[in-house]
Amino acid sequence: MKNDLHTFGWYAARITPHLPKKVFKPVPSRLLGGLAYLIIVAGGILAIGLFDLNFWLSIGISIILGFSFAGLGFLGHEILHGTVVRKHWLRDLLGAIAFWPLCTGPSLWIKWHNVDHHGHTQDEEKDPDAWLSHDQLEKKPFLRMIYRIPFFLRSIFGFIALAFTFSFHSFRMFLIYFREFKSGKRMKVFMQFILPWASWIGLMFVIGFTNWLFAFLLPLLIANFIVMSYIATNHRLNPLVPVNDPLANSLSVTVPKWVDILHFNFSYHTEHHLFPGMNPKYYPLVKKHIKNMWPERYHEMPMWKAMYALWKTPRVYYQKDKLIDPEEQHLYNTLGSGLDPDDIRSSKKWKDRAGIKPLLPRKNRMEN
Ligand SMILES: [Zn+2]
Ligand SMILES: [Zn+2]
């Protein structure tokens, strides 16, 4: 597999000659979308805080706030890639504002996402967002216990977890990366983490707990779910790879045009990994070129289908290009080697095939 993989730079170098120069310029007009979201957020929170709204109206506003929090997060992502404004201080300030509802600071995000996730996508050890492999699972007794829960319940929990995983993962990243910052920068990273949380918790004392649930907590869960639906489908159906090849390790999902407008083209994730420094406004053009040059390598799938595949397949990698259910020992192929989430019959046969190391038999595993 290794010989057949190429880095994102290899692909980018082949597409760039076909692109007009303007696609590499920042696009400050994207901020207008952010301004619209900010006005909606401020209006929604004020309405919940000031007026005695009935339950259903509060829920309705909460949902709109959740969509806005997520939309701002997607904008924050492209701002912090430097594709909206170039000046670093302005990039960080606007990125901090856009990520304020999701409580993720720009310095942490740039290190975690731009440097490590983009630099080492789907690398078992170095990508902070990559899902764990069977070898890693063997070393984690607590997680192994979780994986003994029947698969169906694990799927349900996995989907409920989408509603809080971004915040949870973001907090984990803060704990992991904090020490890696130079001591002079740590205060800044800490403030970027604590200030958003302090402001949202402070809001609770101003508008009261029940109002706060509608103005912040429920929207945060909704935003988590939306953002994670993309993040989970962007890479988790793809294999782990020895070379950071976006056509092998990323999936672009397709969504209705109006959703792409609300989410700043975040669905074009393979295109994003090829050109992280290009504004997503131009990704439809990049997509056209990829599909022209490497149609057999490119992965795209409607969002609902990708979610269905996530639901049906287990989340542990086995030998990099397969997904395994450690309890049932069913194996599924990943994208690029024939992913078929409904193929449980052939997945049952996998374990008997030659060349695949048998896992510990169930009896022994229970004794461990
Ligand atoms: Zn990115
Ligand atoms: Zn990614």
Image (cartoon, rainbow, N blue to C red):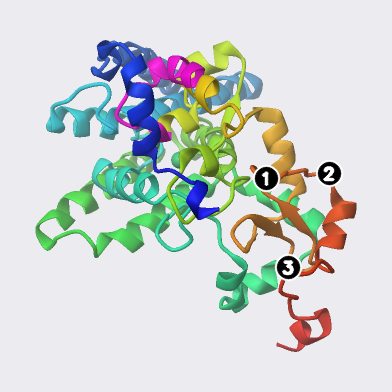
Which quadrant would residue 118 be assigned to in this image?
A: top left
Report the amino acid beneath label 3.
Answer: Pro
Is 157 drawn above or below residue 290 in the view shown? Answer: below
Q: Which residue is denoted by mark 3 in the rendering?
A: 326
Q: Few, some or many C-alpha atoms within 10 Å of disc 3 (few <14, some 14-19, many ≥20)? A: many
Q: Do residues under tags 1 and 2 come within 8 Å of each other at their CB atoms?
A: no
Q: Which residue is denoted by mark 2 in the rendering?
A: 342
Task: Tell me the mark number nearer the camera, choosing from 1 and 2.
Answer: 2
From the image, give the main secondary structure of the stretch colored magenta: helix
Task: Write the residue at 69% across / 44% down.
Answer: 310
Quarter of the image with the C terminus in it: bottom right
- Look at the image and tell me whether residue 275 can be seen: no
Residue 48 in percent (x, y) is at: 48, 23
Mark 2 vs mark 3: which is more N-terminal? Answer: 3
Is 351 drawn above or below residue 40 in the view shown? Answer: below
> What span is colored magenta in the figure?
273-289
Task: Write the residue at 9% across / 58% down.
Answer: 184
Count of number-bearing discs? 3
Q: Disc 3 to disc 1, how far (Cα)?
A: 19 Å
Task: Write the residue at 54% across / 54% down.
Answer: 240
Residue nearer the viewer, 5 or 256: 5
Q: Which residue is denoted by mark 1 in the rendering?
A: 159
